[in-house]
Image (cartoon, rainbow, N blue to C red):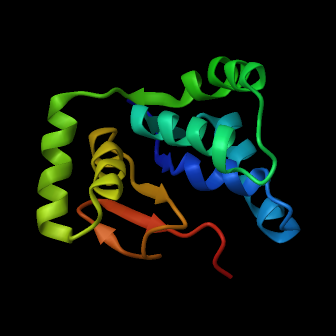
Amino acid sequence: MSAEVVVDTNNFFRDLNTTDARRRAVAAPVAHALLANGEACISFQLVLECLNTALRKAQVAQDIESMRSFVYTVLTLLLLVPARPALCHSALGILAGWRFSFSDSLIVAAALTASCSQLLSADLQHGRHVEALTIHHPFMR
């Protein structure tokens, strides 16, 4: 695995499709830059969260055919951390040690599994370090 950054796609997809121009203006260039330079990756969990957000929670809901295209043109290119029992075990250790939610623990475990140095997430504390991983909130000023 060669990525440097795990992107919490749930947040990025929601913010790319929001009516909040400031958040969209921040999310779009970051997402495009990470895709263009090949530095980003996601886990299978984030694929599921992204699809759920796009189809059910986004302010601009997406249709199924658009999402099929998005899966093949974007998400599969970023998917470097598959669902495996070892990932769940790692997440349980993070949950016990760091007191994140289980879902957030899975994201952190995926980032560590992929040997990433950064996690972009609006849900976790900006600047926090978990082992060799640093959490960055992409919308902080």
Query: Which residue occupies the foreground of this view, 75 or 14?
Result: 14
**Quadrant that contains the C terminus:** bottom right
What x and y, as percent, mark residue 90? 16, 46
Query: Which residue occupies the foreground of this view, 94 or 102?
Result: 102
**Quadrant that contains the N terminus:** top left
Task: Give the image quarter of residue 130.
Answer: bottom left
What x and y, as percent, mark residue 32? 74, 43
The answer to whether residue 22 is left or right of residue 42 is right
Q: Residue at x 36, y 50 (%)?
A: 107
The answer to whether residue 137 is left or right of residue 86 is right
The vertical placement of 135 against 30, above or below, is below
Q: Residue at x 33, y 43 (%)?
A: 110
The answer to whether residue 103 is left or right of residue 53 is left
The vertical placement of 44 against 56, above or below, is above
Q: Residue furthest front?
A: 56
Q: Residue at x 16, y 30 (%)?
A: 85
The vertical placement of 58 against 75, above or below, is below
What x and y, as percent, mark residue 44? 41, 31
What x and y, as percent, mark residue 40? 54, 41
The answer to whether residue 87 is left or right of residue 2 is left
Count of numbered tags: 0
Task: Give the image quarter of residue 122.
Answer: bottom right
Q: Residue furthest bottom?
A: 141
